[in-house]
Image: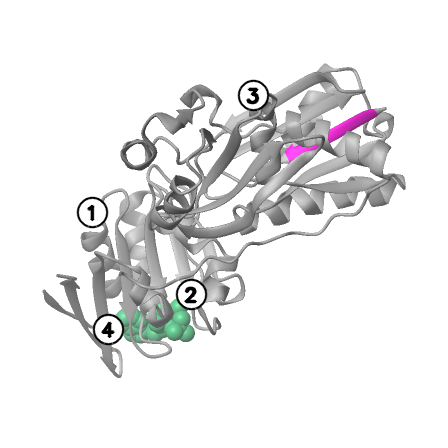
Amino acid sequence: MKTLALDTATAAASVAVVEDGKMLGVMTLNLKKPHSQKIMVAAQKLLEQLELKVSDIDLFAAAHGPGSFTGLRVGIAAVKGFADSLNKPAIGVSTLEAMAYPYLMYKDLVCPLIDARRDQAYYAVYKKGTQTEEIFKADCQNIKNIICQLAVLNKKVIFTGDCVYTHKDYIVSQLGENAVFADELYCVNSAVAVGYIAEKRYLYKKESGISPDYVLKAYTGND
Amino acid sequence: MEMLCKSAEDTVLSGFEFGKKLKKGDVVCLIGDLGAGKTTFTKGIAKALNTKYEPVSPTFSIVHDYGGDIPLYHFDLYRLTNENDLMSIDFDSYIFSDGICVIEWPDLALDLLENYYTVEIKYSGNMRTINIKESE
Ligand SMILES: Nc1ncnc2c1ncn2[C@@H]1O[C@H](COP(=O)(O)OP(=O)(O)OP(=O)(O)O)[C@@H](O)[C@H]1O
Ligand SMILES: [Mg+2]
C-alpha cells in the first residue's frame, strides 16, 4: 500500500510517500516562515516526480500535533480533503512520536522537543519496548521543568527537535553524559516517519481518523 | 516624538517616515479609537517597507501578511477575547519571526511583548496627534 504523509507542525513543511514500510520520496522545505500553503504544491510536485496520481494513494496521513496551530490546520485539512474526495482513509500521528521514531532503535529514552518560544517546549518521552511506550505524555512546559523531570530518572536520553540546540548547554549542565543529541542536520521534521507509523497503525491496529491534537501552552507573561 | 497630521495623507506620510526606521523583528502597537487612523498609518509603514500588497482593515482575518523585503504582518486583535485566541493564530511565530509586526488593538498581547513601539493616535475632526514611544 502507498501512504502520502504530511508534517506541517513546525517551520519545516514536509511531504513523503511511503510504500509498505519503504520510503519512495520525500520533500522538505525548511522555510522558517510562520506558516505555509506551499505544502500542497510540494505534495503535487513529489507525486508528479514519482509518477503517481493522488488516486494511487491508499492512505493519507498527517502529523496531528503538537505544533504550530496554523500549520496543523493546513496539514490536516489537506489530508482530509484528499481522503474524503477519494473515499480513502486518513490517519493522524503524533508529531513528537514521529520525531522520536528514528532513535527508538537504540532502546534509550528519546525526548523530542518542539520550540514553543519563551523557553517553553512541546515534548514527550518515548522508549522502545515490545511497542513504543510513552513514558511522559505530550505536554508543553518550561525547558527547566522538562529537564528536571528527566534528570531524576538518571538514564541516558536522546534529544531531537527544532530547539534542542538552543537549549543544549542547559541540558548538558543538568544531565551531563546522560544527554545525547541527534545531529543538528536531522533536527528538522520530516514526514517519512509520519507515513511509516501511519501505515503500521492502519494495517495492524485498524486505526484511522484524524483531528488536531493542540497541546496548549501556558502564556504566563514576561516572568 | 509628537506629530500633527491634518489629513489622512499626512498620517500616511508620518507612517512612512516612521516605517523607514523599522528593522527585522520590530513590533509596533497602535493605540487609538475606532477610525483614529491606525490602518491609515500602517499604509505608510507598508510603503516604507515596499510591501507587495497594500494594507486593508484586517478585522475579518486577524492577521494579514503583506510580503515585502522584510515581511510586514498586520494584526487587528479587536475581536479576540483571550490568550488562547492568540495561540490559535500562532501569535508567537510572528513576533519571533524575521518580519515586522504592526498590531491594532494590542491590549491582549501587551503582556507577551518585550520591546515594542507604541504609536498613539488622538483625534478631533480631521486633525490627528500622533505620539510615538519606545517601550523601556
Ligand atoms: N488626519 C487623518 N489621519 C488619518 N485618517 C484620517 C485623517 N483625517 C481623516 N481620516 C479618515 O479617518 C479614517 C481612519 O480610518 P482607519 O481605518 O485608518 O482607522 P483605524 O484606527 O484603523 O480604525 P479601526 O479601529 O476601526 O481599525 C479614514 O477614513 C481616513 O480617511
Ligand atoms: Mg484599522
Letter of the chain that mark 1 sits on in the rendering: B
Name the residue: 48% across, 22% down. A186
User: What is the crowding at mark 1: few (fewer than 14 residues within 10 Å), some, or many (at least 20)?
Assistant: some
Secondary structure category for the residue under label 4: strand
Q: Could you give the CA–CA distance between mark 1 and mark 2, rounded to whole angstroms?
A: 22 Å
Looking at the picture, do discs 2 and 3 lie on one chain? no
Give the quarter of the image for residue B8.
bottom left
Secondary structure category for the residue under label 3: helix
For disc 4, the marked residue is B121
Question: Is residue A37 visible to the viewer in this orientation of the structure?
Answer: no
Residue A7 position (above or below residue A123): above
> Is residue A5 shown in magenta?
yes
At label 1, which amino acid type do we have?
A: Lys
Magenta extent:
A2-6
The numbered mark at residue B76 is: 2
Letter of the chain that mark 2 sits on in the rendering: B
- Residue B41 screen position, x and y as percent: 29, 62
> Is residue A41 shown in magenta?
no
Q: Mark 2 or mark 4, which is nearer to you?
A: 2
Q: Could you give the CA–CA distance between mark 3 and mark 4, rounded to whole angstroms?
A: 60 Å
- Residue B110 screen position, x and y as percent: 30, 66
Q: Mark 1 or mark 2, which is nearer to you?
A: 2
